[in-house]
Image (spheres, helix red, strand yellow):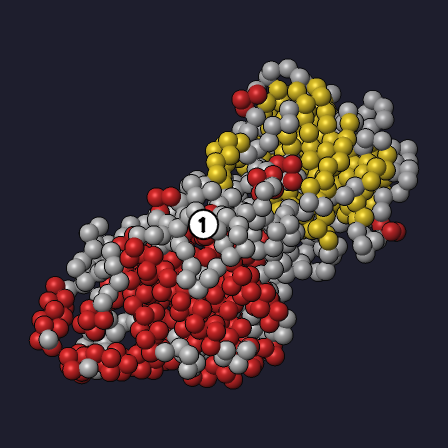
């Protein structure tokens, strides 16, 4: 029999491994249609990677059980050296874990109890069927069963319970039930949309089972037969992942599968052909990193959740490859560092990130915790600016991915507060207006992007705003959960800070996923156009448009002017070619009416707040709505063209709120800013005269809002389009910055000069004729 093994193995080795991007037909050594037999498993041992291969194969001829037992022992020893942590020292490390994270025990126990209460060890893997509570298992629940993430919680409970064998028996029973289901064809395949061997779900299962394996290896109840069965199972899953992922496909599902394939190839390199798996996995991952991370460093799906998730994917591979001396493409470090730097661009003064698109960690939460994620950056790069956002000690989420010597380095990180001012991720379409990095400083993100490929995780929030000030979510956005009935509502415009026309939301043509798990995407989302982006030390300006209402004959524009030390001026201009429409401006939060239809206030628990004031045309009405305890404020105008000119005024406490009456003789003073409302034919000061409806002055100049003309000295300046502009004082250069949406012309006339014409471009400064 031994000669048969050696001939079989020689044939495998002589044929050579497949190329990383080889034929769609898998080579002979890959078994995707069944699990390897014991005989095949032993024959697959590679003498080049596993020096004892020949001895075990010879022993197998005489005593198969003894050979398999010896193989299991050798693989245990190798796993101790190759995995993220040494299973032989897990007791001491677990004691440290439970001391560092005492609250995690209740969470692990709760999740393990949920899993065991729903599914028997001999689980079923094909719908329809009922769980242990007698309820129909949903597609969403089956997908999570396939991921096996709560099995990892059960492995934690095994350690909390002094290695109670019941947890090992449950795990090995469930693993074998999957193998039996595969051999019998009683499992969900990819065609139905809920495949248990689909790349993401199979990959997630591999990551969880590898850690379960490491936790159980020191347990007497985890027999050598169970260990061999797990190796057989992982090799089978690896073969499937290798076969399914020969060509690049957009999305994190393939990424997770490729990560799992790389880990299997590193940890079980004792088996012939796994080097081809590693090459394939790394080639696929490299292509994802190249094509799915935008030039500005943010993940192409525009979600914080999927951005951080991708970084964790690559970290898992880089960390294990470094431990085992495997090559990693040199460009990975550069690209990954760019991903952490992109997170810094979005970060708020409280070191959190705003909620953007399908963020799913905590449904209805209004921010993203990223200290654990940024700790990965600290491990990889030890950059003081990235370190600034990392947790003060190792986070539970990555504790088991780090080697002991890395913990000490993380305790003594050098941290430096970023100096980054207002900035943008232009390829992704996020524009960040930032006052500074001190507690309470103002921060706002404008969403003005649409993924060119696979915008599945995008929400109906085109030109939407998310703002934070004085430590509060003053204009929040909300995390979601795919399985919730109102996921479709929280993925659309009534829970965003946007404008609407005739009640029509931005996201349309809902398309639930094939498996019916609750996830879905919009068949239609507006395409944005960024017209201008002008950040500066005293004020920032953004202007954009989208095509969401072209079918109604309405062109949508939004501009945001950030006056640092005051707040934001938002102009929403909706131009109709089809007569009157109903225009709505939606703001998130809980508001009280302060003055008619023009002034509302939100007050937070610490006494800070946000005031919303309509400085332009008075809305016809206002209303409030509630969803899941979240509120909004909706202003409505019914007319041919919609035009909102809105002040967003955050204040830190009672004494900082807007006074009542707000304007005295048409003037409101706030810090270094003075706001004037036109009450007669023209606004006038020592510097200018204009028909603008609102003027906002500072020492540097004046913003004229809704101006058609202005006068300085003996010169009169007439605009082709009524819009907004900034006039710098002569001492500051005497330039005009056009804050409109289109290229326009400025005509200059005076008693002692000929008429002159000046072209104005949005966001650009031009020298006024002298």
Relative height, residue 537 to residue 389 (above, below): above
**Label total for image:** 1
The residue at which mark 1 appears reads as: 129
Q: Is residue 435 above or below residue 379?
A: above
The answer to whether residue 475 is left or right of residue 227 is: right
Question: Where is the C terminus found, in terms of image quarters?
Answer: top right
Residue at 54 percent of width and 61 percent of height? 117
Q: Quadrant of the N terminus?
A: bottom left
Residue 669 placement: quadrant: top right
The residue most toward the front is: 134
Residue 638: x and y in percent read 71, 21
Residue drawn 19% across the image and 69% down it: 40
* Residue 672 appears in the rendering: no
The picture places residue 130, in percent across and down from the top left corner, at 48, 51
Q: Residue at x 55, y 41 (%)?
A: 459
In the image, 704 versus 568, the foreground residue is 568
Residue 91, position in %: x, y? 50, 83
Point 83% across, 22% down: residue:
681
């Amino acid at each position: 029999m031994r000669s048969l093994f050696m001939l079989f193995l020689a044939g495998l080795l002589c044929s050579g491994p497949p190329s990383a991007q080889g034929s769609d037909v898998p080579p002979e050594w890959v078994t995707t249609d069944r699990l390897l037999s014991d005989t095949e498993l032993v024959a697959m041992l590679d003498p080049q990677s596993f020096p004892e291969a020949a001895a075990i194969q010879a022993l197998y001829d005489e005593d198969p059980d003894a050979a398999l037992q010896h193989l299991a022992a050798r693989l245990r020893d190798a796993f101790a050296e190759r995995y993220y942590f040494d299973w032989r020292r897990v007791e001491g490390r677990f004691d440290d874990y439970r001391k560092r994270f005492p609250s995690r025990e209740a969470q692990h126990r709760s999740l393990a109890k949920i899993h065991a209460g729903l599914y028997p060890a001999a689980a079923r893997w094909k719908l329809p069927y009922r769980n242990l509570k007698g309820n129909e298992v949903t597609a969403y629940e089956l997908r999570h069963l396939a991921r096996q993430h709560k099995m990892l919680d059960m492995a934690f409970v095994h350690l909390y319970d002094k290695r109670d064998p019941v947890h090992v028996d449950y795990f090995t029973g469930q693993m074998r039930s999957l193998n039996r289901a595969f051999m019998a064809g009683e499992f969900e395949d990819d065609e139905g949309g809920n495949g248990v061997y689909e790349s993401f779900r199979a990959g997630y299962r591999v990551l969880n089972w590898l850690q379960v394996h490491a936790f159980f290896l020191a347990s007497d109840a985890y027999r050598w037969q169970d260990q061999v069965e797990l190796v057989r199972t992982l090799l089978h899953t690896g073969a499937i992942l290798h076969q399914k992922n020969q060509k690049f496909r957009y999305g994190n599902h393939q990424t997770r599968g490729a990560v799992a394939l790389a880990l299997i190839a590193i940890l079980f390199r004792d088996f012939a052909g796994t080097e081809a798996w590693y090459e394939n996995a790394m080639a696929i991952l490299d292509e994802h990193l190249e094509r799915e991370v935008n030039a500005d460093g943010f993940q192409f799906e525009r979600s914080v959740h999927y951005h951080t998730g991708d970084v964790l994917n690559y970290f898992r591979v880089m960390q294990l490859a470094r431990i085992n001396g495997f090559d990693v493409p040199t460009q990975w470090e550069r690209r990954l560092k760019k991903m952490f730097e992109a997170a810094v661009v979005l970060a708020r003064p409280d070191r959190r990130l705003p909620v953007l698109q399908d963020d799913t960690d905590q449904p209805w939460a209004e921010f993203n915790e990223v200290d654990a994620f940024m700790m990965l950056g600290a491990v990889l790069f030890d950059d003081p600016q990235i370190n600034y956002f990392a947790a003060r000690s190792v986070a539970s989420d990555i504790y088991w991915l780090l080697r002991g010597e890395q913990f000490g380095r993380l305790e003594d990180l050098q941290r430096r507060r970023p100096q980054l001012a207002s900035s943008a991720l232009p390829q992704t379409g996020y524009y960040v207006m930032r006052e500074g990095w001190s507690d309470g400083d103002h921060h706002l993100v404008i969403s003005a992007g649409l993924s060119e490929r696979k915008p599945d995780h995008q929400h109906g929030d085109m030109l939407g705003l998310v703002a934070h000030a004085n430590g509060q979510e003053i204009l929040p956005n909300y995390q979601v959960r795919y399985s919730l009935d109102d996921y479709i509502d929280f993925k659309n415009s009534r829970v965003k800070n946007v404008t609407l026309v005739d009640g029509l939301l931005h996201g349309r043509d809902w398309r639930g996923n094939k498996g019916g798990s609750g996830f879905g995407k919009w068949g239609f989302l507006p395409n944005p156009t960024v017209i201008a982006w002008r950040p500066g030390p005293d004020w920032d300006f953004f202007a954009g448009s989208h095509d969401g209402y072209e079918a109604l004959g309405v062109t949508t524009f939004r501009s945001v002017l950030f006056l640092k030390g005051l707040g934001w001026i938002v102009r929403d201009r909706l131009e109709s070619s089809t007569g009157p429409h109903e225009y709505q401006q939606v703001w998130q939060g809980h508001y009280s009416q302060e003055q008619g239809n023009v002034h509302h206030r939100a007050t937070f628990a610490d006494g800070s707040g946000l005031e919303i004031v309509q400085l332009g045309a008075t809305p016809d009405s206002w209303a409030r709505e509630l969803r899941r305890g979240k509120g909004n404020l909706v202003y409505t105008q019914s007319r041919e063209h919609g035009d909102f000119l809105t002040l967003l005024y955050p204040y830190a406490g009672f004494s900082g709120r807007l006074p009542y009456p707000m304007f005295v003789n048409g003037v409101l003073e706030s810090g270094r800013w003075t706001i004037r409302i036109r009450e007669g034919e023209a606004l006038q000061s020592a510097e200018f005269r204009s028909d603008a409806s609102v003027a906002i002055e500072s020492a540097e100049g004046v913003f004229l809002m809704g101006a058609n003309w202005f006068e300085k000295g003996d010169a009169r300046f007439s605009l082709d389009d009524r819009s907004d502009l900034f006039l710098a004082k002569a001492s500051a250069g005497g330039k005009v910055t056009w804050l409109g949406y289109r290229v326009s012309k400025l005509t200059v006339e005076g008693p002692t000069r000929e008429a002159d014409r000046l072209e104005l471009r949005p966001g650009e400064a031009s020298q006024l004729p002298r």
